[in-house]
Amino acid sequence: MQQNIISAVDIRADKIICLIAQELQIINKGKILQLIGIGTSKMPVDCLKPLALDSEIIKKYIGDAIKSAENEAGVKLQDIFVSISENLSSKYVNFEVNIGNSNINEENIKQFFSSDSFKELYTQNEEPLHSFPISYRINDKKSVSEPIGQKADKLMVKWHIINVSKDYLNKVYLLFNELEINLKQVVSSHYSSSLAVLDDYESDNGAVTIDIQKNKTILSYTFDGQIIGYDLIKIGTYHFANDISQIKSISLDESEKIRKQLDIVDFDRKNNKILDRFFDIYISRANELVDLINRKIETSRFNSLISSNIVLTGYGAKSLTVQKLMKQKFNLKQFRLGSTKKINGSKTFLDNPSLVSAFGLLSYASNHVLEGENTDKNTKKKSILSIFYHFFRNL
């Protein structure tokens, strides 16, 4: 039995999460991921952008989470994957390949990465973090879901690019360099969340992953195994607590405690007299958020592809009120609360929707390799972008 250690750090406004897993190759059973260490570092209640904190302060939060996970796992980390949710943007690029009346192969699709179209994505201010081929058209006419093996003169590929601020990315690398940990790759939390919670059917046939974070809510659209787009709503759990703080003239720390209590109150059977006076404020914001989510999905150009399967994740997904409102709003859809799949560990952790982006990062790390890491024994899947990532980011 072979064993490999994989580690991941998820940088979020509510907390820093560090997970450590063993990748086990078991004869006749294949590969499994076993969680062996978890560490969290809770962020201040008024923190909305972790990397806006003083570098020594954020470094301590990250270091504390890593140390806690290391102590539990009994290992010292050398390499790490990191997920982020800030300073990201999305764009689409059409790239045409001349096939010459031949059968299309994988290398034809990868020509994008040696093209000027790809190199131009690296600008003074931003660079690509992920690239997803999301649609194919043969000879300007026929749209296909799988072009490999088909004969064509020309192939048009539409790529979905997730960009990140170069300054922000460099700051992430600098932090881990100062912590003396090799940062292997940075991954979008939108992507890692979908990897954690979607099963193969949902990923292939279309789904929306709704990640209610502390400072925002992100809707990620997945189809045919690729992230085809995402939307942003500038409402998160902080806004629930801030409403209570402003209206009732209490501290943000106190209102955050009340928000967490309200999260587990069943609004059909609420009978807590102390919390009753805050509930109207809470449910008003919850209704606004759910209405905005519904509107975003209904007006998305991807609606017909992704709206049948809806999965709720994130720090705010624990709210029973939000869950019930979502079920009512999407009563004809397949709606569920997200939980981590394909990783072994405590059910308490795997079923926690606020940890899914961190667990998805472990899955990403286990199934993707960077350039120069391939060996005959390595069966990991190459990331469509990571092969070229470190070369081009230094241009």
Image: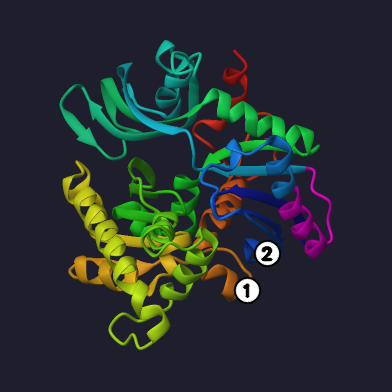
Left or right of 160 in this view: 383: right
* Nearer to the camera, 262 or 357: 262
Q: Which residue is mark 2?
A: 35
Whole-percent x and y of residue 235?
Answer: 36, 51
Q: Is residue 131 visible?
A: no
Whole-percent x and y of residue 301?
Answer: 19, 41
Q: Compared with residue 328, is residue 116 higher up or lower down, i.e. above or below?
A: above
Whole-percent x and y of residue 375?
Answer: 70, 37
Left or right of 363 in this view: 144: left
* Nearer to the camera, 329 or 34: 329
Residue at (46, 59) in percent of width and height: 314
Residue at (20, 34) in percent of width and height: 143
Alpha carbon of mark 2 to alpha carbon of mark 1: how far?
Answer: 8 Å
Of helix, strand and loop, which mostly describes the magenta segment? helix
The magenta segment is 63-78
The disc labelled 1 sits on which kind of residue?
Ser
The disc labelled 2 sits on which kind of residue?
Leu
Q: Which residue is mark 1?
A: 346
